[in-house]
Structures are given as structure tokens and as C-alpha cells.
Amino acid sequence: AFPQQVRIVEVGPRDGLQNEPGPIIPTDIKIELINRLAAAGIRHIEAASFVSPKWVPQMGDAAAVMAGIDRQPGITYSALTPNVKGLEGAMAAGVTEVAVFSAASEAFTQKNINCSIAESLKRFQPLIEQARAADIRVRGYVSTVLGCPYQGDITPAQVAVVSRELIDMGCYEISLGDTIGTGTPLKAKRMLEAVAKEVSLDRLAAHFHDTYGQAVANLYAVMEEGIAVIDSSTAGLGGCPYAKGAAGNVATEDVLYLLQGLEIDTGIDLQAVVDTGHWITRELGRANGSKVAQALGTCGR
Ligand code: HMG
Ligand code: MG
């Protein structure tokens, strides 16, 4: 049965912008994007990334972004942290939720965070302990759950093992990343079935990229199984710097339209997100990746 409510985790300001080629996006634009998304009714926004600026230059102003946003009560503004140094930066910036990230693929983990999966988990141990001691919630990402750009096929069992470990270490939720968007509904369902044997469904989220245009279909499939948390990116912004050719996340507008059709409530104003998507893609000088946004156009905001 489908969930009655779905929580959207908007990752556009992080996953969407981290890979943007060309000049560094001005901090003010990042801040305005986050504020607009909050005003549209999104309750959970991944706002920044405290990673090495040598690795991901677009996220180099994470502290300034966190300091500049107009924080609204009841909204979570989270950030990626790959290690304790990242956590320290996030804590100094007043972040109340962080996310660690590993993968089901050894090869991808090496390219992305320069260590093995086992080493990544070891690195997260003190991070998670320190975060929890400071009342900071920790989310866990597992990337490449439906395929790896370097390794190819990933078995559902590999995804289940890493997900379970992150939960046992203290993550409150695992976001399952189809990093390169090669998944299909049946594959997504089988992967989820394997993971749900190790981690309860109410602690799992779907983080699907739309490279092959399958993300909405894949979301439909996993919602049918009970997934009620969806990561998405306004205007379908993004890609992954360590997954060449990967397109952005599924567009938030497309997910909201799907959910409206399923009569599932989110409390988010679709047109306000559409307007925000048109605004940010104009600022970046790129096409809007959301079909729904293209269809609805803008009402000038
Ligand atoms: P490394 O080079 O192995 O680490 O990188 P290191 O400890 O040797 O540090 C190298 C330099 O970075 C040092 O500076 C450190 O101080 C600095 P130097 O001495 O050379 O001047 N440094 C940092 N600076 C700021 N913040 C930090 C930090 N840590 C070290 N936190 C490291 C290892 C993990 C740092 C690096 O590989 C890294 O930052 N990787 C980030 C990669 C990334 O952000 N990828 C994209 C996000 S993941 C994703 O998009 C997938 C997801 O969306 C889900 C999905 O779609 O599947 C989440
Ligand atoms: Mg991603």
C-alpha cells in the first residue's frame, strides 16, 4: 500500500549545485535558493556540504551559506560531512543534522571519498559518536545501490550489509542512492526487499537520479513497498562529480506532481517550487530538468 504522507528531502542546494561546472555560484544565490525552498513549504533541505574544497569547490562556502540562511522554525537544514573535520565545521556553523556517505561499491567509495567502504565506516564512527553527543542527528547515504559507474552491477545483498552497518552505528535513516540513475522499477523493488530485511522500512529513503528517465517509475515502485521519504532536487539540478555522466536527482516538481496524483500529502506548494526552479536555472544559465516545471511555466516569481 502507498504511504499516506511522504516527506521530501530537498537536496538541490547540495547535490544539485555541488557539480555545477564553471564559476563558483555566489553564496547569495545559494542562500536565496534555500530560503525560497523553505518558503515553498519544504521541511527538510540539505543545504551544504562540509567536504574538502579541493575535491568539491562549489561547496567551499558551506559555512557562509549556513550562516546566511534565514532559518525557519520546524525546518531541518542539513549538511554532508565526510569525516570529523567536516562535522566540526558543520557544528561551528550551527548545523543540527548531518549526513555521512558511503556506498555499496568499493570502486565508487575510493573515487568519491578516497578510502574503502570499511575505512569509511571506521571514519564515521567518531563522527557519529560526537554528533550524537551534541544532539545532532546523522543520516546515512549508501550510493550506487542500483549500479556503479566503475564496477557495474551491485547485488542487493551488498546494499543491505552497508545499510545495516550504518544503522547499527547510529544513523537514524538510510538514504538509498541510485547515483547514476540506471535503475528500473523491478530492480529497485528487489533491492529494497533485500535491504528491508535488515533495516525497517520506516528508516529508509529513496534518493534516485534521473539519468535514464526512470526515477519517477522507480519511486512509484518503492512507494508501493512502503517508502515514505524521497530525496529530490528542484529543477532536477545536479549530478555527481565522481559519477561521470550522471544526471541530476529526480526533480522535486515531478515528484510533487506524482504525489498529488496519488493523493499523497506533502504540504508543499508545487507552483512555488516550480517558480524557484525557473529562477535558479535562469541564474545558472541552464535548462530546467523538470518536465512538470516546463509544463506549468512560471507565474513570474
Ligand atoms: P583525502 O584527500 O583523502 O583526505 O580526502 P585528507 O584527510 O588527506 O585531506 C586532504 C585535504 O583536505 C587536507 O587539506 C584536509 O585538511 C582537507 P590540505 O592539508 O591538503 O590543505 N580536508 C577537509 N577540508 C574541509 N572539510 C573537510 C575536510 N576533510 C579534509 N571535511 C575527503 C578525503 C573525504 C576529505 C575527500 O575525499 C572529500 O572531501 N570527498 C568529498 C566527495 C564529495 O563530496 N562527493 C560528492 C558527495 S557524495 C554524492 O553526491 C552521492 C549522494 O548524493 C548519494 C547518491 O547520489 O548516491 C550523497
Ligand atoms: Mg546524489
Image (tube, helix red, strand yellow):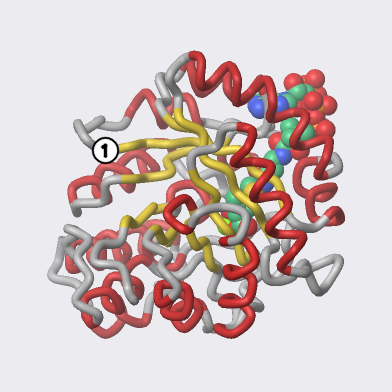
Image quadrant containing the N terminus: bottom left
Q: Quadrant of ligand 2?
A: bottom right
Percent x, y of residue 259:
27, 74
Residue type (three-letter) at the residue carrying disc 1: Ile
Nearest to the observer: residue 125 or residue 254: 125
Question: Which residue position is annotated with label 1?
Answer: 75
The quadrant in which residue 20 appears is bottom right
Residue beneath the point at 51% across and 14% down: 133
Residue 22 in sight: no
Foreground residue, 65 or 220?
A: 220
**Would residue 52 be visible to someone looking at this image?**
yes
Q: Quadrant of the C terminus?
A: bottom left
Write the residue at 86% across / 43% down: 116
Give the x, y percent position of residue 254: 34, 75
Looking at the picture, does residue 223 appear above or below residue 131?
below
- Against 9, is 55 above or below? above
Where residue 109 appears, x then y in whole percent? 79, 49
Position above or below: 218 against 170: below
Tell me if residue 65 comes above or below residue 195 in the rendering.
above
Q: Position of residue 263 (x, y in %)?
A: 19, 76
Q: Residue at x 76, y 48 (%)?
A: 112
How crowded pointer 1 is (Cα within 10 Å; few <14, some 14-19, many 20+) is rated as few
Q: Nearer the viewer, residue 254 or 282?
A: 254
